[in-house]
Amino acid sequence: MGERALALLSRPKAECSVILVDDETIAALNRTYRGVRGPTDVLAFAMTEGPFGASWPDLLGDVVISVETARRQARERAGGLRAELALLLVHGILHLFGYDHDTARRRRAMWPQQGAILEACGLTQVPMGPSGPGGRVRPKGAASGHRAPR
């Protein structure tokens, strides 16, 4: 999934690490690096930022995913854990590329890109509202349900 996402973003030789953690670990990272208490689903740490960012342009950074949060979200969104992890990985990779969703304008740039990558990987994204990684994900052709925006 990650390699396909990087290829679709025209960076097939780029690399990023993917780190799967529990809620306690991601909550500590969230507090330390974002000043936000509690767990989150995914964090991205870009290596391309800062004074040495241009030194290794194909080394993008780290995507840290809480498997516990992903499992909960998969149940809430009526999707499988694998699809939720795929969504969070793509979401984190897009953050490494500089995409964000903190404003409506930036969401309008990020969500279609995220949806296109997921679709190219055989997943369908169902929009869920302005916050979070952009919606539930399910394999193409799977039954869909309805859930109010978060």
Image: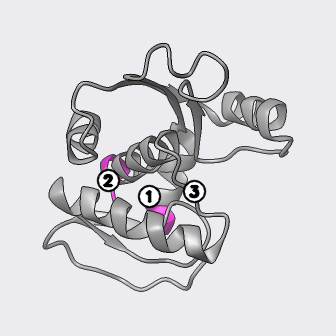
| Mark before the other along the chain sequence, 2 or 3 | 2
Name the amino acid type tagged 3: Asp
Residue 77 seen? no
Asked whether 24 falls inside the magenta stretch, the response is no
Distance from the alpha carbon under mark 2 to that under mark 3? 21 Å
| Element type where label 2 sits in the image | helix
| Element type where label 3 sits in the image | loop
Q: Image height check: is 2 above or below 138?
A: above
Residue count near mark 2 (Cα–Cα under 10 Å), binned few <14, some 14–19, many ≥20 = many
Q: Where's the N terminus, which quadrant? A: top left
In percent of width and height, residue 114 lies at 36, 60
Which residue is located at x 66 percent, y 47 percent?
40
Distance from the alpha carbon under mark 1 to that under mark 3? 22 Å
In percent of width and height, residue 58 lies at 37, 22
Tell me if 47 is positioned left or right of 33 in this view.
Answer: left
Which residue carries the number 1 mark? 74
Name the amino acid type tagged 2: Ala
Distance from the alpha carbon under mark 1 to that under mark 2? 8 Å
Given contact means CB atoms under 8 Å apart, are the residues at marks 1 and 2 in contact?
yes
Name the amino acid type tagged 1: Ala
Which residue is located at x 35 percent, y 83 percent?
145
| Mark before the other along the chain sequence, 1 or 2 | 1
Which residue carries the number 3 mark? 100
Which residue carries the number 2 mark? 83
Asked whether 81 falls inside the magenta stretch, the response is yes
Residue count near mark 1 (Cα–Cα under 10 Å), binned few <14, some 14–19, many ≥20 = many
Q: Quadrant of residue 79?
A: bottom left
Q: Quadrant of residue 35?
A: top right
Q: Which residues are magenta?
A: 74-82
Which residue is located at x 27 percent, y 35 percent?
11
Tell me if 80 is positioned left or right of 48 in this view.
Answer: left
| Element type where label 1 sits in the image | helix
